[in-house]
Amino acid sequence: MDLQLQGTTALITGAAGGIGRATAHGLAAEGVRVALLDSDGAALDDVARDCPDAVVLTADVTDEGQVQAAVHAGVAALGRLDAVVCCAGVSGPVGTPIEETTLDVWNRVLAVNVTGSFLVLKHALAALREAEAASVVLLASDSALVASPGMVPYCTSKAALVQFARALSVDLADTRIRVNTVAPSIVDTPMSRSDLGAAAFDDPPFPVQSAAEVAAHVAYLVSPRTRAVNGTSILSDFGYTARSGFPA
């Protein structure tokens, strides 16, 4: 299927690694000119080498001043903005009870995973409104629906991100801007390997998807082919949440 993305533009946050990196490469392969935003400038330069005419933007998504400057610079360099994909995220504590979770850690997870998307879109919406057909895709997680022990901040942030996207899609219903989320289960990324240990991916007892597979879902939602898909989430979890807990 031709996704009809040739000649369009996209701003991608968290583009230095993991799903963000795969999304940058995937969209670039479809003919999208990308602006890459991350706090790791050196890693961004590496990603940009495989993205023709990419724009590199170094910024912390939790800092509104940096976000505003980066988004405006990105739009100016691209000349237009057709899509925003928010991949920037942190996992926070893994296996940590809530009583042992500090306020600073809680605030950090919510700041990056939720507030970061809010800030980027706050300053990108004016440019998106000018597009003929614009798409916003936020990277959530199946942790928005199910939970693992000791990951309360992360699960909370991903659930908030899903509802943020739904609410924003309602606010923008009279525009040509669609807002959706992708919610994958375990993805083989540096962050997942750090959380679970690299050995956990040698012969995993659970299904694992690649970052490129998630990026393909993103590309589908960015595409004007999905113009009727709005305010929803693609859950890619190998059917796990469809299973009944009934012991039969």
Image (cartoon, rainbow, N blue to C red):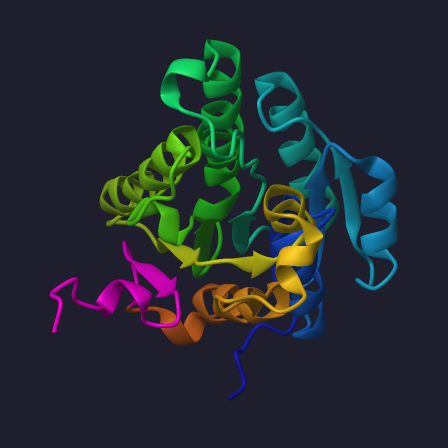
> Main structural element of the magenta stretch: helix, strand or loop?
loop
Seen at 29% across and 59% down, the residue is 230
Where on the picture, by quarter, is residue 100? top left
Could one spot residue 64 in this view of the protein? yes
Q: Residue furthest front?
A: 247
Seen at 42% across and 34% down, the residue is 151
Q: Percent x, y for residue 239?
A: 32, 71
Could one spot residue 79 in this view of the protein? no
In depth, the one of 110 and 199 nearer the eye is: 199
In depth, the one of 246 and 25 nearer the eye is: 246
Q: Residue furthest top?
A: 103
Q: Percent x, y for residue 197?
A: 66, 48
Q: Percent x, y for residue 27?
A: 64, 66
8 relative position to 57: left or right: left
**On-image quarter of the C terminus:** bottom left
Q: Is residue 40 above or below residue 183?
A: above
Q: Residue furthest bottom?
A: 1
157 relative position to 215: left or right: left
Where on the picture, by quarter, is residue 112? top right
Report the magenta residues as a range.
229-248
107 relative position to 164: left or right: right
Seen at 82% across and 58% down, the residue is 53
How many numbered marks have been drawn onto this rendered protein structure?
Answer: 0
Q: Is residue 209 above or below residue 232?
A: below
Residue 8 lies in the magenta-colored region: no
120 relative position to 99: left or right: right
Q: Is residue 53 above or below residue 6?
A: above
Residue 243 lies in the magenta-colored region: yes
Q: Percent x, y for residue 232?
A: 28, 57
